[in-house]
Image (cartoon, rainbow, N blue to C red):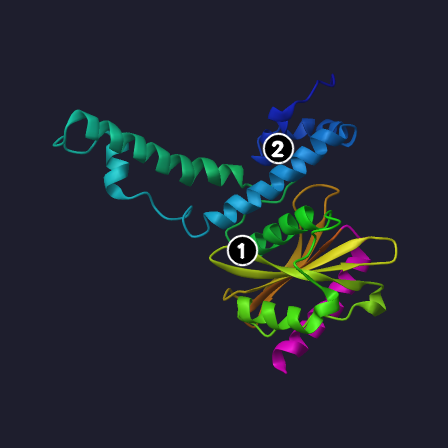
Amino acid sequence: MTRRDFSERDIHMALDGELPGEERMAYDSWLETNPEMKARSVRYIADRAALRAAFAGVMDEPVPARLRQALLGEATVKAAAWRSRWWLSAAAAVVLVAGGLAGYVAGIDGVGRGDGADDQLAEQAIAAHVIYAAEKRHAVEVPASDKDHLQTWLSNRVGLKLVAPDLAAEGFQLVGGRLLPAGHGKAAMLLYEDAKGERISLFVTAESADKAKGTYMAEKDGPEAVYWLDKGYGCAVVGSLPRERLAAVAKSAYGQLLAGLAS
């Protein structure tokens, strides 16, 4: 197969799951040799998660009957022509949001969009990590030097008794934390760093969904999330570590979070 030139349009096709499978390997190689485009792809993934969070609970709602009828031309014409045109535009916009946006947030690299809170939690955690882990001066709102205030502040805002896990045994020290939006609620993000400057993040939010656990990667060679939904909260540990090390760090963090919630 002759290798073709890729463009920004192909990034969107990959995000929408529309890039032909036979072109995937060449596309991934193209990203690796084009740092600017790879950074753009990562940013679009973060945008996708932010859009999904902003429209959580809306995308899956059915289009109101009156708008669907207007769009299909089934509504009885009783209003002035300008009003009919206005409703038609509104109906089209609703369909665009409900349908087009759902396509935009579809997963890539074989990871489907999914309807569960687990994928949504993992995507939000990865998006936050991509944005803030790279920050040098403004990665956190409250530094680790004010740990007691950090824990109390985030616990009150998120609605959970949050204890920042001690990950020194795994080689990571707490940098600090920040408050983030998460769907219709709020999430706490705790950032950690090892001696080499490698960073991982812990994303925690109140979550009423059923129990679940797993791993999630939004993009090949991108950060990976190890997540749980359990006991009324959702937790995801995100980083670019080897999978075995990330799993070990996540296991330690998970155990300490459970102990903190039970105390």
Q: Determine whether, in the image, residue 137 is placed left or right of residue 157.
A: right
Q: Residue at x 77, y 32 (%)?
A: 32
Secondary structure mostly seen in magenta is helix
Depicted 42 relative to depicted 11: above or below: below
Number of disc labels:
2
Depicted 47 relative to depicted 247: above or below: above
Q: Determine whether, in the image, residue 120 is placed left or right of residue 42.
A: left
Q: Specify the quadrant that holds the C terminus.
A: bottom right
Find residue 224 and report its horizontal and vertical position in percent: 71, 51
Q: Which residues are magenta?
A: 240-263
Q: Residue at x 61, y 29 (%)?
A: 19
Disc 2 on helix, strand or loop? helix
Q: Determine whether, in the image, residue 1 is placed left or right of residue 127.
A: right
Disc 1 on helix, strand or loop? strand
Please tell me which of labels 1 and 2 falls first in the chain: 2
> Among all residues in the image, which is located at the extreme left?
78
The kind of residue on which mark 1 rests is: Pro
Of 90 and 251, which appears nearest the observer? 90
Of 202 and 173, which appears nearest the observer? 173
Q: Is residue 108 visible?
A: no
Name the residue that disc number 1 marks: 181
Image quadrant in which you'd find residue 254: bottom right
Q: Residues within 10 Å of mark 2 (few under 14, many from 20)?
A: many
